[in-house]
Amino acid sequence: MKTIAKHVWQAPLSAQFGLAVIVLYIFVAVFAPTLAPYGETEVVGEGFAPWNGEHWLGTDNLGRDMYSRLLYGARNTVGIAFVTTALAFLIGGLAGLVAAVKGGWVDQGLSRIVDVLMAIPQLIFALLILSVVGTTVTSLILVIALLDATRVFRLARSVAMGVVTLDFVEAARLRGEGMWWLITREVLPNTIAPLIAEFGLRFCFVFLFISALSFLGLGIKPPTADWGSMVRDNAILITFGDISPLLPAAAVAILTVGVNFVVDWMLHKSSGLKG
Amino acid sequence: MLSIIRLLSQRVALGLLSLFAVSVIIFLAVEMLPGDLAEAMLGQSATADTVAAFRAQLGLDQPPLQRFIGWMGGILQGDFGVSLANGREIGELVSTRLGNTLRLAGLAALISVPVAVLLGMLAALYRNSWFDRMLNTTALSTVSFPEFFVAYILILVFSVQLGWLPSIANITPEDSWLTVLERSMLPVITLSLVVIAQMMRMTRAALINLLSSPYIEMARLKGIKKSRIIYYHALPNALAPIITVVALNLAYLVVGVVVVEVVFVYPGLGQLLVDSVAKRDIPVVQACSLIFAVTYIALNTSADVLAIATDPRLMHPRS
Amino acid sequence: MNTKTNNDNKDVLLEIRDLRIAGHCDDEWHEIVKGIDLTLHRGEILGLIGESGAGKSTLGLAAMGYCKDGCKITGGEILFDDKDLARCSEEELRKLRGVRIAYVAQSAAASFNPSHRLIDQHVEAALQHGVSDKAKARAEAIELYRSLNMPDPEHIGERYPHQVSGGQLQRAMTAMAMACRPDIIVFDEPTTALDVTTQIEVLASIRAVVEKFGTAALYISHDLAVVAQMADRIMVLRHGKLVEEAETRKMLAAPEEAYTQSLWAVRLFSTNQKAQPETEVPLVEVRNVSAGYGAKQILEDVSFNVYKGQTVAVIGESGSGKSTTARVISGLLTPSTGSVLYNGEELPGDYRKRPREMLRKVQMIYQIPDTAINPRQTIGDIIGRPMKFYHGHKDAVVRRKVKELLALVELEPDRYIDRRPSELSGGQKQRICIARALAAEPDFIICDEVTSALDQLVAEGILKLLTRIQEKFGVSYLFITHDVATVRAIADQIVVMQQGRVVDNGSREAIFTPPHQEYTDLLLSSEPEMDPDWLDGILGRRAMASAG
């Protein structure tokens, strides 16, 4: 733990900012009910009330407290993005490692399937499937996780490919070790650093993607507080010069910037150590 | 030259195969519907007779393979079928909007490609300078912004506060090109900003990779001027990676229009797609998805083809 | 090779005084070159020799006023032409580079631009510096190609780098360095990437052309025998400092420092040859094996035997199929015809079909120890795993046995057992690999170029250790190597391979005693010897043989 603290202390300002943002968001997500003055879906007054002492950021189109919904949004939007990314990593990462370790027709088969899936633009694919199966939180998570798993597969496979050609993996194969040992003991520990960095990047992507879908009205459904749909529902205020609808968008942007800064620092560090 | 021709034809074949696979997937997506399209359209209140009649009208009583062939055959002749929502010809619905979308993406490409490549090259040349750091941080932030965030900030500044540009891009075919240009300005700028950041970062990475190669060091040790190292030693080899970066980002751009079109109420294909998804107008969704996918695959394939064609090792094979 | 005796100052071309260079690594600056003095006279060839990390390449580049990214000159002077290159502007340095001081890199394949023809890259410096016009420069290029014995000198320059072979490319690079008739050429390991039979030709060409124009040179290499052929004077470097400096003959005849002598340690080591048993069934028999990847056939009808307690060395150049042979025996590559027999029984071609007990008996040690052990496991886990896997020992037993093995490979058990590989040096890692192989208690160990990536003294230690282990446990070794000195040191039987075939096979004594088979003769005679007259001698003999 000492060394982690030391790394953080010596990190560039941008990475420290990123880490602080991440910690803050996690805090807000966990304690949203305690921090929020009103309920998530509670109608507390007139629609589009301006900022005032009672409702710090005014109210939304249906008269719900913007500030409270912004806090709950951290829980919903970030939470769903996180679960989706984790699922994508479980599916794509595991498949990528298996493909690299097994090689042969397993690798060929999986890689060709992924090639075809990746040939379709992700947003279009998501819209197509969601229009058919309908947008519930579950279908949203499953569809995006599956689509994103293809990207994770590509990366996990290519990183693992670099490791499986190394002699210590060959030595383990010649010893007679099984696939599970090869994956968990030999390959995974040596691919974990780029995979963590990729997790950060994929999270950003998924987070932006879900926000975009919600903004288009095809993502997380009302009345759940979600940053993307909050922008959509209150966008009209912008034409009157009110910046409240931009706040949820800024919330999305700040977290993404923060995560990107941290990932950038991590990638820079790992490439520096190699050289 | 044989190996290069083989590689190129392989890549084009793979592109065609992807196209076919994509059309199958788009077609099959509808098959995944619980029940079928007719039931989905008419809702639960419809009687069995109405559903059956509707089914026959849509040709849903035929086997899937036959329907697929019919669907594909129609599309190849420009016939996308009829919209479920308003009964209009999809081909007609799509054509003007496709033109609008392509104009939007084209204008954005016209601005973003030269700017991004130039900035990327400068950043790579002066890497780790304050200029590079500033550019890098800005780009990293920009790619982190949701497109609608960038769009609304631009609206807030340029149309609400300054009043220079309209916030709504409701163009019609009757508008003069000057009006069209004025109304497309904010969507084009939004799209360009997002793409420039991404493309600049990728160009920079590709060039830095190239500038660290031993033959660049050799040129420096031969006492060659920096400018000549760039255009004689680096650029001929940088062509392939830069072309790949540009084509990849153009592909992204064509898809990226969707959100921007919705924000600015721009009458393009993306908005049609989003509206149709909301209305569950499946034939239109299929048509739009197919057009987007075809453009995307075509751009990606040409990226690879150009990259192969400009690789010096492949251009001059070992006789 | 006229040896300089006068140290007249007029003759001094380049003088380096107390040079210090630091490199940036892990957010800290480390000194790579720690105060070196160097003098190069007009027309003299100065050899810089040292092991990896000695700072010799950094010093060579510094002679051109050049530092790699992440390095900087922190002190001292580099005097050339009344200028201090350590303090010159980039523009002043640029005007010297390529014209007055030129560079020949180790990897010619990577150092030529793939987009341009060889001759265009050759004449570039001359044209850019305004030394020559295009027609004249091209004519001179062709003349140089001829002097360097390149095939078809009139047209070879029209080719692209990837269209010519490695040896030719290295000569083309030497020609390119000569283009402006520089005063100094820095040769940075120019033949290290080449096979010995190609190396000898390139060495001969380089020396001829350097002598012809009287060019002074810094010749950097890790191989003292090679440097001895080229240099008038040699500086031995270690850890960025000078160990010894002397004229070539004097240094070879009477090295003052023990470290200098250790640079040819492997050549001084030799085991007693064990006689081949007459009747016994061979432990491993490779019988008429042909194998390849896809349509590409690599091995053709390879046969040889390995007996219990013996060391068989398979020697050959790159592309000879020696490593493929090892892959066939270990079961990584299934032969298309022929088979591998173990104690007279045929082994399945695919290792996945071999029983675990069989896998245990055949172990492997690799060329590059850094990639042969998992950096994320502790030494105890690495060596302990085969014990658990094959013998099912309990943790306490495993730990005790691991310590015994560590002691056997001469690593302090309690100090190393819980460490990770990154804390170990290359030689120590190779010892871990040996211990891991022994942990399985094998009968047969395949050693694939196990000493090639190691410095001489470390390599000698590994060879001694392997010999001791063989005496103690009676294991058999299959030594895959390209290095004649290693074979001469430890082989009982020798298999010579060329282009996928066994061309010669016999005991060490038989192979090394003339008359030789034709290719064996070429291979053995191409290995540079610790004798400054070796290159002249061998070239003379070959010229006579081809004339007669």
Image (cartoon, helix red, strand yellow):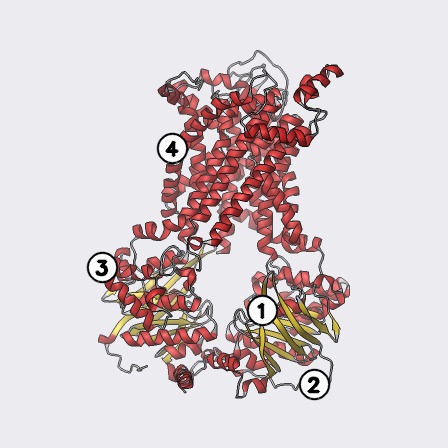
Verify CB contact (< 8 Å) between mark 2 and mark 4.
no
Give the mark toward the camera: 1 or 3.
3
Q: Amino acid at mark 3?
A: Gly
Amino acid type indicated by mark 4: Ile
Identify which amino acid the numbered label 1 is placed on. Gln
Q: CA distance from mark 1 to mark 3?
A: 53 Å
- Chain ID of residue with mark 3: C
The amino acid sitting under disc 2 is Pro
Pointers 2 and 3 within a single chain: yes
Left or right of residue C167, residue C307 in this image? right
Q: Which mark is residue B111?
A: 4
Q: CA distance from mark 4 to mark 3?
A: 41 Å
Tag shown at residue C428: 1
Q: Residue at x 55, y 36 (%)?
A: A205
Q: Nearer the viewer, residue C158 or C254?
A: C158
Q: Is residue B268 above or below residue C528?
A: above
- Please indicate, yes or no, whether residue C431 appears anywhere in the rendered image: no
Q: Are marks 2 and 1 on the same chain?
A: yes
